[in-house]
Structures are given as C-alpha cells and as structure tokens.
Image (spheres, rainbow, N blue to C red):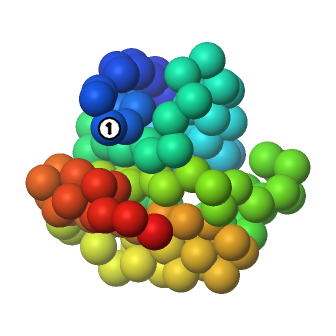
Amino acid sequence: MSYKIDIRCEPDYLYVQASGIRSAENAISLIKDYMKANENHGYKRIMVDIRSMTGELSTIDSFIFGDGAPKKLGGVHSELKTAIVDLEEHRERFRFSEGVLVNRGFNLRFFSRTAHAERWLRKSK
C-alpha cells in the first residue's frame, strides 16, 4: 500500500483524507479501506479528499479503476453517496472516472471544492 488515510467522523458524513501515490490499484484499495472503516460508523455519505495524492492516473488507469472497482468490491454500492475532492487540474481525468463509475452503479461525484462537495452530500437523493 503506497497511500495513507486519515478518517474523521463529521456530523453528516465520514471524512477521509488520503495521501500517497495515485494509481488504479491504490484507488480501489482506498475505497475498500474507507468502506470497511465506515462499517463501524454506518454513514450513508462519505467525503474523500485526495488532493494530497501525487501523480496522475492515465486514461487507461482511470478506466481500469472505474471498471474494476465494482468487481473488486463485490458489487455496486449505490447506497453510499460519495464525494471525491481532487485538484482542479485533474478535472478532465476525474470527469472520465466519474462517468465510468456512475455507469457502473456508484453514487458519486468528483469536486474541486470542499464546499461544493458538502452541499451535494447534504442534498437528498
């Protein structure tokens, strides 16, 4: 594992901050880790801040991540509303990953601002 996560319980959501190296494998492992941590808390909303992660996923890695996540996680997790906060410079890449994951049944969106992510998380389904 070449990443580290810190988890904090907020009133409305589980906050996960990740640092380390960006890769499709790490992204899938990160999801597994925060979902396992959430089993103890039972949140329906999660914010994952990956702005401290280094590197950038290639287009193929973005697809591998989006396509492989449901398979490696044992199905779809649409009951969890997940906001991913990343740097603005990664907007095009995270739009691609978001599209792949949403098409695979995940209820998530990528944001470059924490305030926008919080607003989306607090909205009803």
Residue found at x 23% / y 52%: 118
Work out whether 9 lies above or below 84.
Answer: above
Quarter where residue 66 is shown: bottom right
Residue 42 drawn at (x, y percent): 57, 30
- On the picture, is 75 further left or further right than 83? right
Q: Is 41 or 57 nearer to us in this picture?
A: 41
Observer-nearest of 34 and 28: 34
Q: In the image, residue 7 lies at what x, y percent?
A: 40, 21
Residue 111, above or below 96: above
Q: Position of residue 58 (x, y in %)?
A: 52, 68
Where is 81 relative to 101, above or below?
Answer: above
Q: Quadrant of residue 61?
A: bottom right
Q: Residue at x 29, y 55 (%)?
A: 122
Can residue 35 be seen at all in this image of the molecule?
yes
What residue did someone put label 1 on?
12
| Image point (34%, 79%), residue name | 92
| Mark 1, other Cα within 10 Å: few <14 / some 14–19 / many ≥20 | some
Q: How many marks?
A: 1
| Nearer to the camera, 30 or 44 | 44
Q: Is residue 48 visible?
A: no
Q: Quadrant of the N terminus?
A: top right
Tell me which amino acid carries mark 1: Asp
Task: Determine whether, in the image, residue 73 is placed left or right of residue 86.
Answer: right
Please indicate whether residue 96 sits to the left or right of residue 124 in the image.
right
Horizontal placement of 41 versus 36: left or right?
Answer: left
SS state under label 1 = loop
